[in-house]
Image: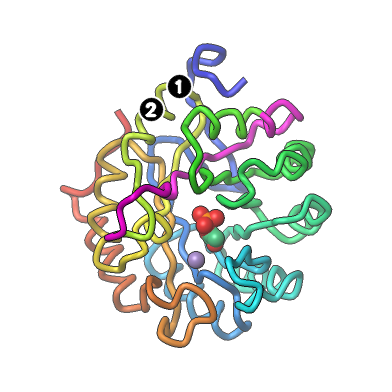
């Protein structure tokens, strides 16, 4: 069902009054984790000022170590929703448990399924039964074929409001956190009719690479960019090494808005 052979035209995902996949770039910006109402409001305000439409923030955090901050759960979703409503932004957050898809449906505009859960088939099926747009991230070591099959799990349950997100894969390279598979973007655009976004934060894990990676993603036809922004990354409860502070984020957006960086999908 996700194959371009079945449906030659691009799927455009409506998220309220905004669209993903219509040839314009959408940006999903916000902190790695929702930490407090004040924190998420500060970021929401800055994000809105830059013309971004979608605010992110993790509430159920799939952390590698059980001793690390696990997120605020439903309270975090409510804070994100509140910030989104206050600043006129759509909100996206990750849901990790099939039984929490309902919470996501209640509080979010887009439900994210994270890299670690790309093959959580029960979660994919539950997401497929909801009517919310789903942002599905590529697994840590998933092939493009496995990624497309995961997407198929969602769509076969009836929900075709699906956005794919390349977020880097694990390779032998250690200079970056993951290896951004830039050619996955045109491959997924050719093979499927779904919008494709690129997460430059988790793929590179390096602040100095966010801008070149985002430019490259736009140049190869990505429908949008995700990146993390935090008021004070040094004290962030997760991903403190790679989130942008607000001035860096503003510079990032200004650079991407330069005419030479804006390439429409062919
Ligand atoms: C995230 O976007 O918050 C996240 C945890 O990313 P990923 O699932 O791609 O690692
Ligand atoms: Mn993060």
> Residue 118 location, x and y as percent?
61, 44
> Residue 6 location, x and y as percent?
56, 13
> Residue 110 location, x and y as percent?
63, 51
Image point (53%, 45%), residue name: 139
Question: Disc 1 versus disc 2: distance between alpha carbons?
Answer: 6 Å
Image point (45%, 38%), residue name: 196
Q: Which residues are magenta?
A: 153-175
Image point (73%, 36%), residue name: 128
Which quadrant would residue 174 be assigned to in this image? bottom left
- Rendered position, 202 above or below 75: above
Q: Residue furthest front?
A: 172
Q: How many marks?
A: 2
Residue beneath label 1, please? 191
Badge 1: few (under 14), some or many (20 or more) residues near its Cα, within 10 Å? some
Q: Are marks 1 and 2 in contact (CB under 8 Å)?
A: yes
- Rendered position, 196 above or below 240: above
Q: Is residue 46 left or right of residue 206?
A: right
Depth check: give the residue in front, 25 or 178. 178
Main secondary-structure element of the magenta-colored stretch: loop
Q: Quadrant of the N terminus?
A: top right
Q: Is residue 68 left or right of residue 209?
A: right
Residue beneath label 2, please? 187
- Rendered position, 107 above or below 185: below
Q: Is mark 2 within 8 Å of ligand 1?
A: no
Report if residue 54 is visible in the image.
no
Depth check: give the residue in front, 183 or 169. 169
């Amino acid at each position: 069902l996700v194959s371009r052979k079945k449906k030659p035209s691009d799927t455009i995902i409506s998220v309220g009054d905004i669209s993903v996949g219509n040839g314009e770039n959408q940006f999903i910006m916000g902190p790695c984790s929702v930490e407090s109402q004040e924190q998420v409001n500060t970021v929401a305000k800055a994000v809105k000022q830059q013309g971004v439409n979608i605010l992110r923030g993790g509430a159920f955090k799939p952390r590698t170590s059980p001793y690390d901050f696990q997120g605020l759960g439903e309270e975090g979703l409510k804070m994100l929703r509140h910030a989104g409503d206050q600043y006129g932004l759509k909100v996206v957050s990750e849901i990790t448990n099939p039984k929490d898809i309902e919470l996501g449906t209640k509080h979010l505009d887009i439900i994210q399924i994270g890299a670690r859960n790309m093959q959580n088939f029960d979660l994919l099926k539950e997401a497929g039964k909801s009517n919310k747009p789903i942002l599905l991230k590529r697994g840590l070591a998933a092939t493009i074929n496995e990624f497309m099959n995961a997407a198929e799990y969602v769509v076969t349950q009836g929900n075709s409001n699906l956005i794919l997100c390349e977020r880097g894969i694990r390779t032998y390279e250690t200079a970056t956190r993951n290896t951004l598979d830039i050619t996955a973007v045109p491959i997924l655009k050719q093979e499927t009719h779904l919008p494709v976004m690129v997460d430059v934060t988790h793929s590179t894990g390096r602040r100095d690479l966010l801008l070149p990676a985002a430019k490259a993603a736009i140049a190869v036809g990505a429908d949008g960019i995700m990146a993390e922004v935090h008021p004070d990354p040094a004290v962030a409860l997760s991903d403190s090494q790679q989130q942008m502070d607000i001035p860096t984020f503003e510079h990032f957006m200004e650079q991407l808005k330069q005419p030479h960086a804006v390439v429409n999908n062919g």
